[in-house]
Image (spheres, rainbow, N blue to C red):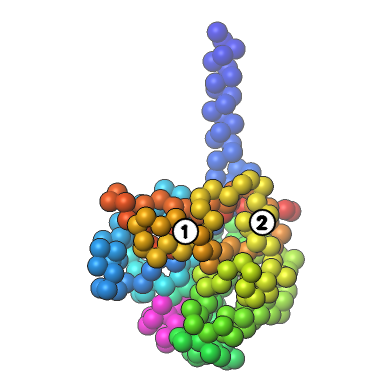
Amino acid sequence: MKSIYLRILLSFILLSLLSDHAIGQTKIMSYNIRYDTDYDNENSWDKRKPDLINLIARYKPDIFGVQEGLKNQVDFIKNNLSDYEYTGVGRDDGKSRGEYSAIFYNFSKFKLLKSNTFWLSRTPEKVSVGWDAALPRICTMGVFQNLKTLDSLYVFNAHFDHIGKVSRNLSAALIVEKIKELGLLRKKLVVMGDFNSESFDQPIQILSMALEDALIISDNKRIGPIGTFNGFKKAHIPKKRIDYVFSRNLDVTAYIHVDDRRSNGLWVSDHLPVFVEFRSKF
């Protein structure tokens, strides 16, 4: 009888040791949260936002990037998730106007060392529209220090244009160029976002030449549907994959397209969040 109790006790201890960062695990999420617009009716931000907070709180990412978040949305997330801060600016003025590609981080686990936002255009250092894009597009980059291991993790979060094919291609090339200029190919690196491109499209091919697709290198089989875009269609099983997490020098231990829904059966956003668990290679 004592041996049974001992085994149970050891199991609980092992589970405790495996939780959070005990073995160097980092949880990352990329999530297009759909911007706040009255046109969405039953899928409007005011109706969805409690469920979005609950979803993030349930999966507890250490770092997560959002796309399409307006100032009121990113502030709502920050104010309702007490363990998180964010870095990023609005794409329309480099301050607070327009959509953010904000990066949130759990400040009890990571410290923000440096951040920057650049525009996906010929003039990345200033507010601008790139090539044949319909709108200004940005990428936010942050350097985060793990407070337990003191390792640094470099994170890029972007949203590519939905119209401009040339813009999407050159946006991917610009991000790779930035990574090489900063000497990050040998660093622990994550590039995530809504790239408005499927796996066979050129932007994904460009990124894949310098980075690893977390879905492909995952130690375990993908959980959830193959696609990430649901378009708020209630009965739809997403098949179109346009949201990605790429990495360098990290092992992927879990990969999920999170298809959790609201209590009324509607989607939390018109995209599924991509949730990835990494373990450092060194």
Which is nearer the eye, 87 or 224? 224
Tell me which numbered mark, 2 or 1, is placed earlier along the sequence: 2
Residue corresponding to mark 2: 216
Under mark 1, the amino acid is: Pro
Q: Is residue 159 visible?
A: yes
Q: CA distance from mark 2 to mark 1?
A: 18 Å
35 versus 218 height, above or below: below
- Magenta stretch holds residue 101: no
Q: Which residues are magenta?
A: 86-99
**Relative side of 48 to 273, left or right:** left
Residue 237 place in picture, x, y as percent: 44, 55
Q: Residues within 10 Å of mark 1 (few under 14, many from 20)?
A: many
241 versus 97 height, above or below: above
Which quadrant would residue 188 be assigned to in this image?
bottom right
* Quadrant of the snapshot with the N terminus: top right
Which quadrant would residue 192 be assigned to in this image?
bottom right
**Relative side of 187 to 29, left or right:** right
**Relative side of 73 to 275, left or right:** left
Residue 172 place in picture, x, y as percent: 62, 77
- Magenta stretch holds residue 91: yes
Residue 165 place in picture, x, y as percent: 56, 83
Under mark 2, the amino acid is: Ile
Give me the residue at 24% from left, 67% from top.
Answer: 41
Residue corresponding to mark 1: 238
Count of picture labels: 2
